Image (spheres, helix red, strand yellow):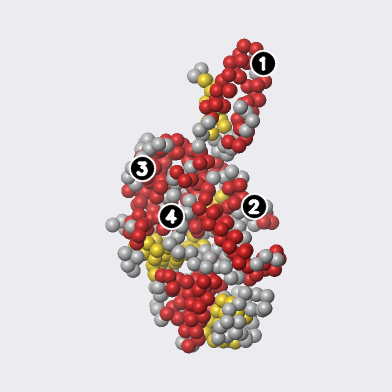
Amino acid sequence: MTEIKLYNTKTRAKEVFTPIEAENVRLYVCGPTVYDRAHIGNARPVIVFDTLFRLLRHVYGEGHVTYVRNFTDVDDKINAKAAETGRSIGEITDETIGWYLEDMAAVGALVPSAMPRATGYIGEMIAMIEALIEKGHAYAAEGHALFRVRSYARYGALSGRDVDDMIAGARVEVAPYKEDPMDFVLWKPSSAEQPGWDSPWGRGRPGWHIECSAMAKALLGDVFDIHGGGLDLQFPHHEDEIAQSCCANGTEEMARVWMHNEMLQVEGKKMSKSLGNFFTVRDLLAQGVPGEVIRFVMLSTHYRKPMDWTEKKREEAERTLRKWRELSSGEKAGEVSPAIVAALADDLNTAGALAELHRLAGAGDAAGLKASAALLGLLGAEMGAWAETTGLSAYETKMSEARAAAMQTKDFSEVDRLKAAFIAAGLEVRISKEGVELVPSAGFDVGKLEGLL
Protein backbone atom coordinates (compact mmCIF):
# COMPACT_ATOMS: atom_id res chain seq x y z
CA MET A 1 0.00 0.00 0.00
CA THR A 2 1.13 3.54 -0.80
CA GLU A 3 2.84 5.27 2.13
CA ILE A 4 1.30 8.70 2.74
CA LYS A 5 3.22 11.41 4.58
CA LEU A 6 1.40 14.47 5.92
CA TYR A 7 2.65 17.55 7.73
CA ASN A 8 1.10 17.52 11.20
CA THR A 9 0.67 21.03 12.61
CA LYS A 10 0.43 19.49 16.08
CA THR A 11 3.96 18.04 15.94
CA ARG A 12 5.37 20.49 13.36
CA ALA A 13 6.73 17.59 11.36
CA LYS A 14 5.95 15.52 8.30
CA GLU A 15 4.83 12.09 9.48
CA VAL A 16 3.84 8.76 7.97
CA PHE A 17 0.06 8.63 8.06
CA THR A 18 -1.33 5.54 9.79
CA PRO A 19 -5.11 5.59 10.13
CA ILE A 20 -6.78 4.42 13.32
CA GLU A 21 -8.80 2.01 11.18
CA ALA A 22 -7.75 1.38 7.58
CA GLU A 23 -11.32 0.30 6.87
CA ASN A 24 -12.69 3.68 7.95
CA VAL A 25 -10.33 6.63 7.47
CA ARG A 26 -11.98 9.70 9.02
CA LEU A 27 -11.48 13.32 7.95
CA TYR A 28 -13.15 16.49 9.32
CA VAL A 29 -12.79 19.91 7.70
CA CYS A 30 -14.28 23.16 9.01
CA GLY A 31 -16.79 24.50 6.53
CA PRO A 32 -18.29 27.95 5.93
CA THR A 33 -20.48 30.24 7.98
CA VAL A 34 -23.39 30.62 5.57
CA TYR A 35 -24.42 34.25 5.21
CA ASP A 36 -22.90 35.26 1.85
CA ARG A 37 -21.16 34.01 -1.30
CA ALA A 38 -17.89 32.10 -0.87
CA HIS A 39 -14.90 34.25 -1.84
CA ILE A 40 -11.96 32.85 -3.77
CA GLY A 41 -9.98 32.31 -0.55
CA ASN A 42 -12.78 30.08 0.78
CA ALA A 43 -12.28 27.80 -2.22
CA ARG A 44 -8.69 26.99 -1.28
CA PRO A 45 -9.34 24.67 1.69
CA VAL A 46 -12.16 23.03 -0.26
CA ILE A 47 -9.82 22.19 -3.16
CA VAL A 48 -6.93 21.21 -0.86
CA PHE A 49 -8.95 18.78 1.24
CA ASP A 50 -10.93 17.52 -1.75
CA THR A 51 -7.56 16.50 -3.20
CA LEU A 52 -6.69 14.74 0.07
CA PHE A 53 -10.10 13.02 0.02
CA ARG A 54 -9.40 11.79 -3.53
CA LEU A 55 -5.95 10.50 -2.51
CA LEU A 56 -7.30 8.67 0.55
CA ARG A 57 -10.05 7.07 -1.55
CA HIS A 58 -7.47 6.00 -4.14
CA VAL A 59 -5.24 4.40 -1.52
CA TYR A 60 -7.79 2.94 0.93
CA GLY A 61 -10.83 2.50 -1.32
CA GLU A 62 -13.83 4.74 -1.98
CA GLY A 63 -15.99 3.01 0.61
CA HIS A 64 -13.39 3.29 3.35
CA VAL A 65 -13.08 7.07 3.75
CA THR A 66 -15.53 9.27 5.66
CA TYR A 67 -15.20 12.98 4.95
CA VAL A 68 -17.23 15.46 7.01
CA ARG A 69 -17.43 19.16 6.17
CA ASN A 70 -19.86 21.24 8.24
CA PHE A 71 -22.03 24.31 7.76
CA THR A 72 -22.21 26.91 10.54
CA ASP A 73 -25.80 28.06 10.19
CA VAL A 74 -26.19 29.82 13.55
CA ASP A 75 -23.96 32.87 13.94
CA ASP A 76 -24.14 36.58 14.70
CA LYS A 77 -23.20 37.44 11.08
CA ILE A 78 -26.24 35.50 9.89
CA ASN A 79 -28.41 37.27 12.49
CA ALA A 80 -27.11 40.64 11.28
CA LYS A 81 -27.84 39.74 7.65
CA ALA A 82 -31.41 38.77 8.59
CA ALA A 83 -31.93 42.04 10.49
CA GLU A 84 -30.45 44.04 7.61
CA THR A 85 -32.49 42.39 4.83
CA GLY A 86 -35.69 41.53 6.67
CA ARG A 87 -35.39 37.94 5.46
CA SER A 88 -35.64 34.91 7.69
CA ILE A 89 -32.51 33.16 8.95
CA GLY A 90 -33.64 29.87 7.41
CA GLU A 91 -34.16 31.51 4.03
CA ILE A 92 -30.70 33.08 4.11
CA THR A 93 -28.87 29.92 5.21
CA ASP A 94 -30.71 27.65 2.76
CA GLU A 95 -29.96 29.98 -0.13
CA THR A 96 -26.32 30.43 0.86
CA ILE A 97 -25.73 26.70 1.27
CA GLY A 98 -27.19 26.19 -2.21
CA TRP A 99 -24.84 28.81 -3.63
CA TYR A 100 -21.87 27.27 -1.86
CA LEU A 101 -22.56 23.76 -3.14
CA GLU A 102 -23.00 25.04 -6.71
CA ASP A 103 -19.75 27.00 -6.60
CA MET A 104 -17.71 24.20 -5.03
CA ALA A 105 -19.08 21.70 -7.56
CA ALA A 106 -17.97 24.13 -10.28
CA VAL A 107 -14.36 23.92 -9.04
CA GLY A 108 -14.54 20.12 -9.12
CA ALA A 109 -15.04 19.32 -5.44
CA LEU A 110 -16.57 15.93 -4.67
CA VAL A 111 -19.54 15.85 -2.33
CA PRO A 112 -18.31 14.98 1.21
CA SER A 113 -19.68 11.92 3.00
CA ALA A 114 -21.63 14.18 5.37
CA MET A 115 -22.35 17.91 5.48
CA PRO A 116 -23.95 18.55 8.89
CA ARG A 117 -25.58 21.84 9.82
CA ALA A 118 -24.81 23.14 13.29
CA THR A 119 -28.51 23.63 14.06
CA GLY A 120 -29.04 19.91 13.65
CA TYR A 121 -26.69 19.15 16.58
CA ILE A 122 -27.82 21.56 19.31
CA GLY A 123 -28.73 18.64 21.60
CA GLU A 124 -25.24 17.16 21.23
CA MET A 125 -23.67 20.54 21.99
CA ILE A 126 -25.74 20.96 25.16
CA ALA A 127 -24.80 17.43 26.28
CA MET A 128 -21.10 18.15 25.71
CA ILE A 129 -21.30 21.42 27.68
CA GLU A 130 -23.07 19.62 30.54
CA ALA A 131 -20.25 17.03 30.59
CA LEU A 132 -17.65 19.79 30.72
CA ILE A 133 -19.40 21.51 33.64
CA GLU A 134 -19.77 18.22 35.50
CA LYS A 135 -16.04 17.55 35.14
CA GLY A 136 -15.10 21.04 36.30
CA HIS A 137 -13.83 22.23 32.91
CA ALA A 138 -16.69 24.70 32.41
CA TYR A 139 -19.07 26.84 34.45
CA ALA A 140 -22.34 28.75 34.09
CA ALA A 141 -22.55 32.53 34.62
CA GLU A 142 -25.27 35.03 33.74
CA GLY A 143 -26.95 32.85 31.15
CA HIS A 144 -23.59 31.87 29.66
CA ALA A 145 -21.59 28.66 29.84
CA LEU A 146 -17.83 29.15 29.62
CA PHE A 147 -14.81 26.86 29.26
CA ARG A 148 -12.11 27.10 31.96
CA VAL A 149 -9.02 27.38 29.79
CA ARG A 150 -6.59 26.87 32.69
CA SER A 151 -8.25 23.54 33.51
CA TYR A 152 -6.65 22.12 30.35
CA ALA A 153 -2.88 22.03 30.82
CA ARG A 154 -2.09 21.57 27.11
CA TYR A 155 -4.03 24.63 25.93
CA GLY A 156 -1.95 26.47 23.32
CA ALA A 157 0.05 23.42 22.20
CA LEU A 158 -1.40 23.38 18.66
CA SER A 159 -0.72 27.05 17.96
CA GLY A 160 2.40 27.35 20.10
CA ARG A 161 0.88 30.14 22.21
CA ASP A 162 1.25 30.75 25.92
CA VAL A 163 -1.86 31.62 27.93
CA ASP A 164 -0.18 34.30 30.03
CA ASP A 165 1.41 35.88 26.95
CA MET A 166 -1.99 36.02 25.28
CA ILE A 167 -3.51 37.82 28.27
CA ALA A 168 -0.57 40.24 28.40
CA GLY A 169 -1.06 40.93 24.70
CA ALA A 170 -4.76 41.69 25.27
CA ARG A 171 -5.87 39.17 22.63
CA VAL A 172 -8.87 38.08 24.64
CA GLU A 173 -12.36 39.36 25.33
CA VAL A 174 -12.73 40.60 28.89
CA ALA A 175 -16.22 40.20 30.35
CA PRO A 176 -17.50 40.55 33.95
CA TYR A 177 -19.00 37.05 33.98
CA LYS A 178 -15.65 35.38 33.16
CA GLU A 179 -13.57 33.80 35.93
CA ASP A 180 -10.49 34.31 33.76
CA PRO A 181 -10.03 36.56 30.71
CA MET A 182 -8.94 33.52 28.64
CA ASP A 183 -12.15 31.54 29.22
CA PHE A 184 -14.24 31.22 26.08
CA VAL A 185 -17.99 31.00 25.47
CA LEU A 186 -19.69 27.64 25.00
CA TRP A 187 -23.24 28.98 25.25
CA LYS A 188 -24.70 32.50 25.27
CA PRO A 189 -28.14 33.97 25.89
CA SER A 190 -30.42 34.96 23.01
CA SER A 191 -32.80 37.89 22.84
CA ALA A 192 -36.37 37.43 21.65
CA GLU A 193 -35.31 38.44 18.11
CA GLN A 194 -32.35 36.05 17.98
CA PRO A 195 -32.47 32.30 17.31
CA GLY A 196 -32.37 30.32 20.53
CA TRP A 197 -32.90 26.94 22.13
CA ASP A 198 -33.86 25.97 25.66
CA SER A 199 -30.93 24.81 27.79
CA PRO A 200 -30.01 24.36 31.47
CA TRP A 201 -28.55 27.91 31.31
CA GLY A 202 -31.62 29.52 29.76
CA ARG A 203 -32.74 30.17 26.21
CA GLY A 204 -29.69 30.77 24.07
CA ARG A 205 -27.43 29.58 21.29
CA PRO A 206 -24.04 27.87 21.05
CA GLY A 207 -20.66 29.52 20.81
CA TRP A 208 -18.79 28.88 17.56
CA HIS A 209 -16.15 26.42 18.79
CA ILE A 210 -18.48 23.89 20.45
CA GLU A 211 -20.26 23.28 17.14
CA CYS A 212 -17.40 21.42 15.45
CA SER A 213 -16.54 19.43 18.56
CA ALA A 214 -20.11 18.14 18.84
CA MET A 215 -20.52 17.38 15.14
CA ALA A 216 -17.13 15.68 14.84
CA LYS A 217 -17.85 13.49 17.89
CA ALA A 218 -21.31 12.53 16.59
CA LEU A 219 -20.15 11.64 13.09
CA LEU A 220 -16.53 10.50 13.51
CA GLY A 221 -16.12 9.49 17.16
CA ASP A 222 -14.13 10.82 20.10
CA VAL A 223 -10.81 10.52 18.24
CA PHE A 224 -10.45 10.50 14.45
CA ASP A 225 -7.67 10.63 11.88
CA ILE A 226 -7.39 14.10 10.31
CA HIS A 227 -8.77 17.54 11.10
CA GLY A 228 -8.24 20.23 8.48
CA GLY A 229 -8.94 23.88 7.78
CA GLY A 230 -7.38 27.21 6.92
CA LEU A 231 -4.44 28.52 8.90
CA ASP A 232 -6.65 31.31 10.21
CA LEU A 233 -8.61 28.68 12.17
CA GLN A 234 -5.60 27.30 14.03
CA PHE A 235 -6.20 29.80 16.84
CA PRO A 236 -8.53 30.12 18.55
CA HIS A 237 -11.01 27.83 16.80
CA HIS A 238 -8.99 24.62 16.56
CA GLU A 239 -7.21 25.23 19.84
CA ASP A 240 -10.58 25.56 21.56
CA GLU A 241 -11.97 22.50 19.78
CA ILE A 242 -9.12 20.38 21.10
CA ALA A 243 -9.51 21.65 24.67
CA GLN A 244 -13.25 21.09 24.94
CA SER A 245 -13.25 17.77 23.03
CA CYS A 246 -10.43 16.21 25.03
CA CYS A 247 -11.87 17.40 28.34
CA ALA A 248 -15.44 16.32 27.57
CA ASN A 249 -14.47 12.97 26.04
CA GLY A 250 -11.63 12.12 28.41
CA THR A 251 -9.17 11.64 25.54
CA GLU A 252 -5.55 12.63 25.00
CA GLU A 253 -6.29 13.98 21.52
CA MET A 254 -9.16 14.94 19.26
CA ALA A 255 -7.51 14.16 15.92
CA ARG A 256 -4.25 12.37 15.17
CA VAL A 257 -3.22 14.79 12.41
CA TRP A 258 -3.97 18.51 12.10
CA MET A 259 -3.55 20.09 8.66
CA HIS A 260 -3.77 23.78 7.76
CA ASN A 261 -3.63 25.48 4.38
CA GLU A 262 -2.01 28.90 4.00
CA MET A 263 -3.93 31.99 2.98
CA LEU A 264 -4.60 33.45 -0.46
CA GLN A 265 -3.46 36.72 -2.01
CA VAL A 266 -4.39 38.46 -5.26
CA GLU A 267 -1.60 39.81 -7.44
CA GLY A 268 0.75 39.79 -4.45
CA LYS A 269 -1.58 41.66 -2.10
CA LYS A 270 -3.93 40.59 0.66
CA MET A 271 -7.44 40.31 -0.70
CA SER A 272 -9.67 43.10 0.58
CA LYS A 273 -12.67 45.10 -0.60
CA SER A 274 -10.81 48.36 0.05
CA LEU A 275 -8.12 47.38 -2.47
CA GLY A 276 -10.71 46.36 -5.04
CA ASN A 277 -9.21 42.87 -5.35
CA PHE A 278 -11.91 41.01 -3.44
CA PHE A 279 -14.00 38.62 -5.50
CA THR A 280 -16.12 35.55 -5.02
CA VAL A 281 -15.94 32.23 -6.82
CA ARG A 282 -19.22 33.19 -8.51
CA ASP A 283 -17.66 36.48 -9.70
CA LEU A 284 -14.92 34.54 -11.49
CA LEU A 285 -17.34 32.03 -12.98
CA ALA A 286 -19.58 34.85 -14.20
CA GLN A 287 -16.56 36.51 -15.83
CA GLY A 288 -16.01 33.35 -17.85
CA VAL A 289 -13.19 31.85 -15.75
CA PRO A 290 -13.85 28.09 -15.83
CA GLY A 291 -14.03 26.26 -12.50
CA GLU A 292 -11.42 23.82 -13.78
CA VAL A 293 -9.02 26.72 -14.34
CA ILE A 294 -9.62 27.97 -10.79
CA ARG A 295 -8.82 24.49 -9.51
CA PHE A 296 -5.64 24.20 -11.60
CA VAL A 297 -4.32 27.56 -10.35
CA MET A 298 -4.99 26.54 -6.75
CA LEU A 299 -3.22 23.21 -7.21
CA SER A 300 -0.14 24.87 -8.71
CA THR A 301 0.97 26.09 -5.25
CA HIS A 302 1.65 23.76 -2.30
CA TYR A 303 -1.11 24.07 0.29
CA ARG A 304 1.29 25.13 3.07
CA LYS A 305 2.57 28.09 1.04
CA PRO A 306 0.70 31.37 0.49
CA MET A 307 -1.30 31.18 -2.73
CA ASP A 308 -1.07 34.16 -5.08
CA TRP A 309 -3.93 34.38 -7.58
CA THR A 310 -2.73 36.25 -10.69
CA GLU A 311 -4.12 36.88 -14.15
CA LYS A 312 -0.95 35.40 -15.64
CA LYS A 313 -1.46 32.12 -13.75
CA ARG A 314 -5.08 32.01 -14.89
CA GLU A 315 -4.11 32.46 -18.54
CA GLU A 316 -1.36 29.82 -18.33
CA ALA A 317 -3.74 27.38 -16.65
CA GLU A 318 -6.35 27.88 -19.36
CA ARG A 319 -3.82 27.34 -22.17
CA THR A 320 -2.47 24.22 -20.51
CA LEU A 321 -5.88 22.70 -19.88
CA ARG A 322 -6.96 23.36 -23.49
CA LYS A 323 -3.88 21.50 -24.77
CA TRP A 324 -4.43 18.61 -22.38
CA ARG A 325 -8.11 18.35 -23.25
CA GLU A 326 -7.29 18.39 -26.96
CA LEU A 327 -4.71 15.63 -26.47
CA SER A 328 -6.96 13.42 -24.32
CA SER A 329 -10.23 14.04 -26.20
CA GLY A 330 -11.91 10.76 -27.09
CA GLU A 331 -9.24 8.77 -25.22
CA LYS A 332 -10.13 6.07 -22.73
CA ALA A 333 -8.43 6.61 -19.35
CA GLY A 334 -5.48 4.34 -18.73
CA GLU A 335 -3.56 3.76 -15.52
CA VAL A 336 -2.81 6.47 -12.99
CA SER A 337 0.88 7.34 -13.07
CA PRO A 338 2.69 6.07 -9.94
CA ALA A 339 4.61 9.38 -9.95
CA ILE A 340 1.33 11.28 -9.52
CA VAL A 341 0.35 9.14 -6.53
CA ALA A 342 3.85 9.50 -5.06
CA ALA A 343 3.72 13.28 -5.37
CA LEU A 344 0.32 13.54 -3.68
CA ALA A 345 1.38 11.05 -1.01
CA ASP A 346 4.27 13.39 -0.17
CA ASP A 347 2.19 15.87 1.86
CA LEU A 348 -0.06 16.72 -1.10
CA ASN A 349 2.69 17.93 -3.43
CA THR A 350 0.20 19.09 -6.05
CA ALA A 351 2.78 21.19 -7.89
CA GLY A 352 4.86 18.03 -8.34
CA ALA A 353 1.78 16.15 -9.52
CA LEU A 354 1.07 18.84 -12.14
CA ALA A 355 4.69 18.60 -13.31
CA GLU A 356 4.10 14.89 -13.92
CA LEU A 357 0.96 15.69 -15.91
CA HIS A 358 3.06 18.02 -18.07
CA ARG A 359 5.53 15.15 -18.63
CA LEU A 360 2.76 12.74 -19.61
CA ALA A 361 1.32 15.29 -22.04
CA GLY A 362 4.76 15.95 -23.52
CA ALA A 363 5.26 12.23 -24.04
CA GLY A 364 1.90 11.99 -25.78
CA ASP A 365 0.55 9.57 -23.16
CA ALA A 366 -3.08 10.65 -23.49
CA ALA A 367 -4.51 7.66 -21.63
CA GLY A 368 -2.14 8.11 -18.69
CA LEU A 369 -2.75 11.86 -18.69
CA LYS A 370 -6.51 11.43 -18.52
CA ALA A 371 -6.40 8.90 -15.67
CA SER A 372 -3.79 10.79 -13.68
CA ALA A 373 -5.48 14.16 -14.09
CA ALA A 374 -8.71 12.64 -12.76
CA LEU A 375 -6.98 11.95 -9.44
CA LEU A 376 -6.43 15.71 -9.19
CA GLY A 377 -10.02 16.46 -10.20
CA LEU A 378 -9.02 17.65 -13.69
CA LEU A 379 -10.05 16.78 -17.29
CA GLY A 380 -13.35 15.23 -16.22
CA ALA A 381 -16.15 15.34 -18.80
CA GLU A 382 -18.43 17.17 -16.37
CA MET A 383 -16.04 20.14 -16.25
CA GLY A 384 -15.06 20.34 -19.90
CA ALA A 385 -17.87 22.30 -21.58
CA TRP A 386 -15.82 25.51 -21.40
CA ALA A 387 -13.08 24.02 -23.61
CA GLU A 388 -15.33 22.71 -26.37
CA THR A 389 -14.40 24.21 -29.73
CA THR A 390 -16.97 22.43 -31.88
CA GLY A 391 -18.59 24.78 -34.40
CA LEU A 392 -15.46 26.80 -35.17
CA SER A 393 -15.24 25.20 -38.60
CA ALA A 394 -18.18 27.33 -39.77
CA TYR A 395 -16.30 30.49 -38.75
CA GLU A 396 -13.12 29.20 -40.41
CA THR A 397 -15.09 28.64 -43.60
CA LYS A 398 -16.58 32.15 -43.46
CA MET A 399 -13.11 33.64 -42.99
CA SER A 400 -11.73 31.56 -45.88
CA GLU A 401 -14.54 32.74 -48.17
CA ALA A 402 -14.05 36.37 -47.15
CA ARG A 403 -10.33 36.05 -47.79
CA ALA A 404 -10.86 34.48 -51.23
CA ALA A 405 -13.26 37.28 -52.18
CA ALA A 406 -10.81 39.91 -50.95
CA MET A 407 -8.05 38.47 -53.10
CA GLN A 408 -10.27 39.13 -56.11
CA THR A 409 -11.61 42.58 -55.14
CA LYS A 410 -8.57 43.81 -53.17
CA ASP A 411 -11.01 44.96 -50.48
CA PHE A 412 -9.91 43.38 -47.20
CA SER A 413 -12.32 45.26 -44.92
CA GLU A 414 -14.49 42.18 -44.26
CA VAL A 415 -11.41 40.05 -43.54
CA ASP A 416 -10.17 42.69 -41.10
CA ARG A 417 -13.60 42.92 -39.45
CA LEU A 418 -13.84 39.16 -38.94
CA LYS A 419 -10.25 38.92 -37.72
CA ALA A 420 -10.83 41.67 -35.15
CA ALA A 421 -14.01 39.95 -33.95
CA PHE A 422 -12.28 36.57 -33.62
CA ILE A 423 -9.39 38.07 -31.67
CA ALA A 424 -11.82 39.93 -29.39
CA ALA A 425 -13.52 36.59 -28.68
CA GLY A 426 -10.19 35.05 -27.65
CA LEU A 427 -9.27 33.23 -30.83
CA GLU A 428 -5.87 33.17 -32.49
CA VAL A 429 -6.28 33.52 -36.27
CA ARG A 430 -3.81 31.42 -38.26
CA ILE A 431 -3.83 31.92 -42.03
CA SER A 432 -1.64 29.74 -44.26
CA LYS A 433 -1.63 28.11 -47.69
CA GLU A 434 -3.64 25.26 -46.18
CA GLY A 435 -6.42 27.62 -45.13
CA VAL A 436 -7.69 29.34 -41.99
CA GLU A 437 -7.40 27.89 -38.49
CA LEU A 438 -9.02 29.43 -35.40
CA VAL A 439 -7.26 28.42 -32.17
CA PRO A 440 -8.85 29.23 -28.77
CA SER A 441 -6.55 31.03 -26.37
CA ALA A 442 -6.95 32.01 -22.73
CA GLY A 443 -10.22 33.84 -22.24
CA PHE A 444 -11.99 32.44 -25.32
CA ASP A 445 -15.69 33.34 -25.11
CA VAL A 446 -17.87 31.61 -27.70
CA GLY A 447 -20.68 34.04 -26.86
CA LYS A 448 -18.74 36.85 -28.54
CA LEU A 449 -19.01 35.07 -31.89
CA GLU A 450 -22.75 35.61 -32.02
CA GLY A 451 -23.98 37.31 -35.18
CA LEU A 452 -20.82 36.66 -37.22
CA LEU A 453 -22.36 33.90 -39.38
- Picture coordinates of residue 202 (x, y %)? 60, 84
Q: Amino acid at mark 2?
A: Asn
Task: Please name the residue that numbered disc 4 is placed on.
Answer: 51
- Mark 2, Cα crowd under 10 Å, few <14 / some 14-19 / many 20+, is few
Q: CA distance from mark 3 to mark 4?
A: 19 Å
* Above or below, 401 relative to 7: above
Front residue of 405/294: it is: 405
Q: Secondary structure at mark 2?
A: loop
Q: Amino acid at mark 3?
A: Ala
The first of marks 1 and 4 along the sequence is: 4
Q: Classify residue 274 as left or right of residue 263.
A: right
- Mark 3, Cα crowd under 10 Å, few <14 / some 14-19 / many 20+, is some
Task: Please name the residue that numbered disc 3 is placed on.
Answer: 333
Foreground tag (1 vs 2): 1
Q: In this orientation, does residue 173 appear? A: yes
Foreground tag (2 vs 3): 3
Report if the CB atoms under discs 2 and 3 are less than 8 Å apart: no
Q: CA distance from mark 1 to mark 2?
A: 45 Å
Q: Identify which residue is drawn at 55% across, 26% down.
A: 394
Q: Classify residue 375 as left or right of residue 170.
A: left
Q: Secondary structure at mark 1?
A: loop
Front residue of 109/200: it is: 200
Q: Identify which residue is drawn at 64% across, 85% down.
A: 176
Q: Amino acid at mark 1?
A: Asp
Task: Please name the residue that numbered disc 1 is placed on.
Answer: 411
The first of marks 2 and 3 along the sequence is: 2
Task: Please name the residue that numbered disc 2 is placed on.
Answer: 277
Q: Quadrant of the N terminus?
A: bottom left
* Above or below, 199 relative to 34: below
- Mark 4, Cα crowd under 10 Å, few <14 / some 14-19 / many 20+, is many
Q: Secondary structure at mark 3?
A: loop
